Structures are given as C-alpha cells and as structure tokens.
Image: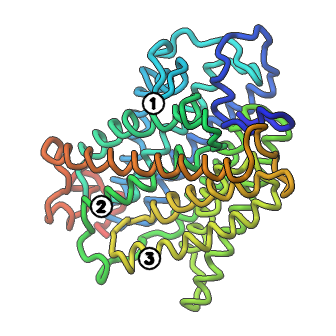
Amino acid sequence: MHRFGSVMAALPCCFLASAALAASGTPAESGHVAWVLTASALVLFMTLPGLAMFYGGLVQAKNVLSVVMQCFSICCVVSLIWAVCGYSLVFGGTGAVLGNLSKGFLVGLDPSVPPSNLPEIVIALFQMTFAIITPALIIGAFPERVTFPFVLAFSALWVLIVYIPVAHWIWGGGWLAGLGTLDFAGGIVVHTTAGVSALVAAILIGERRGFPQHFEPPHRPGMTMAGAGMLWVGWFGFNGGSALAADASAASAIMSTHLAASAGALAWIAIEWIRSGKPTCIGIVTGCVAGLATITPAAGYVHPAAAILIGGLGGAICFFATVFVKQRLIIDDSLDVFAVHGVGGMLGSTLLAVFAAAALGGVGFAESMDFPRQLGAQLLAIAVAAFWSAGITFVLVRALRPLTGLRVDAEREFDGLDFSTHGERAYDYAG
C-alpha cells in the first residue's frame, strides 16, 4: 500500500492498491504475495483469538463466552458482507462518495494490481481482515449487558453504512483521498470510526449494574495479557502488511509499530505507578494497545525514532482520556474503546502531519502538499469520520432497540450472558 521514494509515497496506502485496477500483466514477486497473505493471517489472528481473549479477560467470569462469541460471529458476518458487496463498494469504481458493485461477489478481480502487482484477490483478502476487526473493537464499549441479536444487526449495518463509505473516502480513491488525507493502516478508517461509535453506543445503552462504585475488576488479567501479546504480534501484519510488499517500507512500518507499542506501554505504567503506587498488568497492556493505535495511521510515513515519541504520547494521553471518560464523564465505555482506540487513532492521524516531514526523517509530503495543507487534510478527515460515525451509530442504536431489543433484563444481566444467552459457562462456577 505504501511505497517510499516517490511522490506516490505520500498517497493513502490503500488508494495505491485501487488507483489502477487495470492488470499490468507483470506478475508479483512471490515474496510480496507470501508476505501479504501472511499479514492477512496475522490481522485475522488479532481478532480471533487476540481481541477475543483481550476482551474476555477484562469482563466478569460469567460473561467471557459471550464476548468470544460476539467476536467470532462478527468475523463470520462481516466476511460474507465483504465478499458480497463490501470490497466492491470500497475499491470498485472511481466515485467520490462510494464505489460500485462491479466486483460484487469478488468477480472480475484483476490478476495483477500496481504498484506491487499483487493479484487483486490477495488485496481483497487482506482488506477483509481490517473490516472484520473494526466492528469487533466496538463491542468493548458495551459487554455484559446487550442482546446477541443487537450485536449481530448493529455490526452488519455499521460495516455497511459507516466503515465501507469511510474506507472508500480515504483508501478507495474517494473525496478525502483527493484532498490528500493520509492513513497508512487505519487510524481514521478503523480506530477513529470504532472509537467514536463505541462512545456513542455506550452513552445510549447505559452503564452496567453497579458502575462505577461497585463493580468487579477484570476476572482474568493473565488472559488479557495473552490476548494483548497476540494483538501486538498481529499488528506487525496490520501495519507492515499495509506496505503491500515485502520490502524496506514494510520493515520500517513494523519497526515503528514495535517501538511505539513499547513506548506506549511504559508511558502508561509510569503514570499509573506515580498515581497509584503500583504498575499493573492491565495498565501495561492497555498502554501497549494505545501506542499501537496511535502509530497505526503514521507507521509507514514516519521515521522509527519518531514512532517512539508518537507511541509515548499515545500511552500518556490515552491514559488521561480513560480517566476523563470514566471518572469525570461517568460513561461506561467498559473496555475503553474510545479512550484508547478513538483518541489514539485521532492523535496519531494528527501527528502524522508533523512527523511525515522529510526534515524530521519522514517520507515527505506530496508535491502539492505542505505541513499546513497536510494538517488541514488530516483534521478534516478526522472530523468527518467522527461525525459520520457518531450520527449513524446514534440512528442505528435507536432504530434497532424495538427490533432486536437492546439491553438484556436485570435478571439475565445478573446471571451473566454466558448462560442466560448461550446456555454455556466458561468455567465450572458462575463467577
């Protein structure tokens, strides 16, 4: 998606894959194909089992299966939507607002797509895994209290009405791409949309029983740490694969990703240690994810040294965002989706305009861009994605309430969704 050493390097990563859909006739090097296929597996690994375990360890023992079930089901639903129409609506055609259905059901895909000459089916597969994890992130805002039909319907409609249009605007050659917006691997398309939607959904759905005064801590921090480790490794495919080639650009993106995760984790526990006297397992993994989310939009555009600062700022700012949302606003965004992913994605997308400058070791701006124009393009895209996500989420939650039900009743919430919804338990005790 991202290539160094030319003006094209400053274009949105996914736009490079869709800007020229005519077959070049030149086969891709097998190493490029193998790397992007591997990256696709790594990104899917982020959702299953990475995100499922990360979220599962953070909820109460009586709700862990419900979270895993939601992640698994979202994967299935979104995969089919992507194959039927999603890929085509994002990357088919040249419309400013939306693509077309010329590649519906994945027909008519080109055997070779510039600049890496990958088979288009490889790009479609890689992009599918991004579409899967984005709505799965949102469920962290409302675990332990919503109906399963609502999760399925909301996720499907959200992908169609929020994710697909925003992805086309930035990655599919849409109007924001035309203005010069950059998003290497999803700071706006993935993290901003999911984070803002999570906040709105959490407000509309309401808090869990006992929040915030009397609420049980995460039932299994070790599970969350294992899931975070899977997310960290999978993120190498998320960001490194977005280069769409096995080359120096992928290596630089992976190095930036790793350094930002490390800086974010240490920044978080340093603040936590100072404030509470104890660095926690949950703190270090949350800071890690904050660093990863913050570097995501910039990973292929900035120097790895800059990624340390970006990740550290992400860990620190997301820490205080979490405190603000839960303790000042009293919003039960249960697993901190907005504060970590939303704030991190928006912060990284803004800092990209600073650290992409050649003078700071970045790849430089496109010929028609400079710092003020790039910053303006980034801020506009963040604002548009945030408002679109918030508005559509508000409508979807209100519209689905009478159709699917929204919250489970008090008795089912007390019993836990594992048994009351799915008739199963993760453990031999209710927890």
Closer to the chain start, of discs 3 and 1, is 1
- Badge 2: how crowded within 10 Å, few (<14), some, or many (20+)? many
Query: Where in the figure is residue 133, as x and y percent of width and height?
Result: 49, 44
Q: Say which residue label 1 marks.
A: 79
What is the quadrant of residue 265 in the picture? bottom right
Depth order, front residue of 226/345? 345
Quarter that holds the N terminus: top right
Depth order, front residue of 10/18? 10
Measured in 3D between alpha carbons, the distance from the residue under mark 3 to the one under mark 2, in whole angstroms, is 22 Å
Depth order, front residue of 33/304? 304
Q: Secondary structure at mark 1?
A: helix
- What residue is at 36 percent from the left and 51 percent from the top? 390
Closer to the chain start, of discs 3 and 2, is 2
- What residue is at 56 percent from the left and 37 percent from the top? 176
Whether residue 140 sits left or right of residue 245 in the image: it is left
What is the quadrant of residue 306 in the picture? bottom right
Residue 397 in sight in this render: yes
CB contact under 8 Å: marks 3 and 1:
no
Closer to the chain start, of discs 2 and 1, is 1
- Badge 1: how crowded within 10 Å, few (<14), some, or many (20+)? some
Measured in 3D between alpha carbons, the distance from the residue under mark 3 to the one under mark 1, in whole angstroms, is 35 Å
Measured in 3D between alpha carbons, the distance from the residue under mark 2 to the one under mark 1, in whole angstroms, is 25 Å
Q: Say which residue label 2 marks.
A: 144
Tell us which disc is closer to us: 3 or 1: 3
- What residue is at 70 percent from the left and 31 percent from the top? 36
Q: Secondary structure at mark 2?
A: loop
Q: Which mark is residue 324?
A: 3
- Badge 3: how crowded within 10 Å, few (<14), some, or many (20+)? some
Q: Which mark is residue 211?
A: none
Q: What amino acid is at disc 2? A: Glu
Q: Where is 142 relative to 301, above or below?
A: below
